[in-house]
Image (cartoon, rainbow, N blue to C red):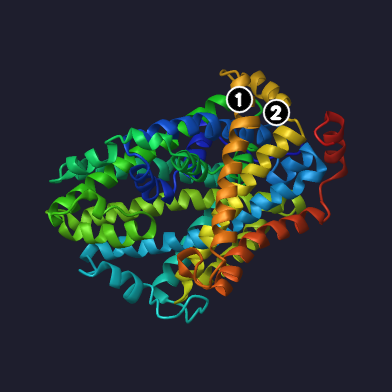
Amino acid sequence: MENRSQWGTRAGFILAAVGSAVGLGNIWRFPAVAYENGGGAFFIPYLFALLTAGIPILIMEFTMGHKYRGSAPLTFRRMNKKTEWVGWWGVLVAFVISTYYSVIIAWAISYSIFSFNLGWGSDTEGFLFGDYLNLTVDPGQTGSLVPGVLIPLIIVWIVVLGILFKGVKKGIELANRIFIPALVIIFLIIVIYALTLPGAITGLEAFFAPDFSRIADPDVWVAAYGQIFFSLSIAFAIMITYSSYLPKKSDITNNAFIVGFGNSSFELLAGIGVFAILGFMATAAGVGVDEVVAGGVGLAFVVFPAIINEFPVLNEFFGFLFFASLVLAGLTSLMSITETYVAGLVDKFKISRAKAVLFGGGLAAVISLLYATQGGLYFLDAADYFINQFGVALIGLVEVVMIAWFLRELKGLQSYANEISDIRLGSWWTICLSVVTPIVLGYMMFGLFKQNLLKEFATDNGNYEGYSNTFIMFGGWAVAAAALLVGILMSFTKWKTTEAVEEEIEKTGEAK
């Protein structure tokens, strides 16, 4: 097989995979999702989802990347030439996500600087949308570039593309060896400090108090599968790409369990820290925890700065640590997201890694400027919602159904993984991927299409976040559709692989 970059150590791969999985969603999405879906009781469907979908898909993608030794498009092509488009679809979804994910990291860099003098002031919401983002235009309008976002955005791309230029071993692996331990240490400091605040126990009681009546609600199970799905970096080319750099002798199933439980452990740590802090805020304001719970951008850039203002001591220091943790979590994820299309371009067109980074990463950086404009937040919000719901989740469904039902590759992948792994895969793995996961993801997608395509288009401004039909069409649906269409078009372009490599693939039966 052709020469391919490799991880220097097993620990390097695991840190990189965990770094990809641990992102902004672990910190600002998981705590709110758990709280809203039964608190402590949510951990039952969450653990079930991890063991029946998260880790099985991780094992499947690790095995695919390791066996076929390629980026997602090349891996799917080597499985069956007719399925290459699925790999490109995942790569294009990753490309879109990288364009706006980088902007959120830029916000976190700005806020880590604002922390030194609590520069967001007392009206944190007004500061974010007015002073910082300068959100003075209507959805669909761009306005002018916002310097406060543009400058850190440039820094983000310089750092990420600089790391990717260095390659897998000297770039991605080395960066994750620094960033992931730093992230864990910083977040442990945050959690320990948060637990000393008055009202912290109130917040934790609200977070962990189980509402077992919610377990009978199918929406809670869908939320659990959705959280596992979106937080593990599965189904959009990342884990296939990363595992293709593993040495030939690698314990695939063990690695998947370590990455899966490592990601969930950080989510639990984030939940403890976030709710200890929310408990402090609720106690200080004399209200219930339910009145201060938030998720997403609002939690990170509105609620948290307001809470930091009220801390009895170390406001500036704690603020810096919190936003530094967002920066580190974001960078490790953005590196992995960008690597998917760098690897795809290298494999497809046989160009140098430097050219692939410059072209792919450079194009993403240019497009990301859209989100650094005055109307950028609206474009970001719509693109994020639609590319996640109708990109990542839909690819996951297509990928699992295609491999399990149509290509019938599960037995072959199972045998391959069992030959080189300590933990042997039994019938639980094939049942999860051929029955449980398709049913749950199918139910999820049916609900999402029904909600967004049928009900919300009934009246103008009845769409996601009340956006107009026109804006939702070109800012949401068109973005998700473009990822699929461009992916299909990419699969029709000619491969520049050498004849010798293709002959070897044919001989070993790795292409059909």
* Residue 124 in which image quadrant: bottom left
Residue drawn at (40%, 76%) of the image: 135
Left or right relative to 493: residue 250 = left
* Quadrant containing the N terminus in the rendered view: top right
* Quadrant containing the C terminus in the rendered view: top right
Position in image of residue 122 (x %, y %): 20, 68
Q: Viewer-proximal residue, 183 or 169?
A: 183
Circle 2: residue type: Leu
Left or right relative to 94: residue 67 = right
Please indicate, yes or no, whether residue 165 appears anywhere in the rendered image. no
Mark 2 crowd level (few <14, some 14–19, many ≥20, 10 Å Cα) = some
* Residue 354 in which image quadrant: bottom right
Q: Viewer-proximal residue, 36 or 249?
A: 36
* Residue 410 in which image quadrant: top right
Left or right relative to 29: residue 286 = left
Q: Upstream in the sequence, badge 2 or badge 1?
A: 2
- Label 2: element kind: helix
Residue drawn at (39%, 54%) of the image: 327
Question: What residue is disc 1 on?
Answer: 429
Q: Viewer-proximal residue, 465 or 199?
A: 465
Please indicate, yes or no, whether residue 146 appears anywhere in the rendered image. yes
Tell me the CA gap for discs 2 and 1. Answer: 9 Å
Position in image of residue 188 (x %, y %): 28, 40
Q: Viewer-proximal residue, 212 or 383?
A: 212
Mark 1 crowd level (few <14, some 14–19, many ≥20, 10 Å Cα) = many
Position in image of residue 342 (x %, y %): 64, 53
Q: Is residue 149 above or below residue 16?
A: below
Circle 1: residue type: Trp
Are the two marked residues, 2 and 1, in contact with CB atoms closer than 8 angstroms? yes
Residue drawn at (25%, 55%) of the image: 292
Q: Which mark is residue 410?
A: 2
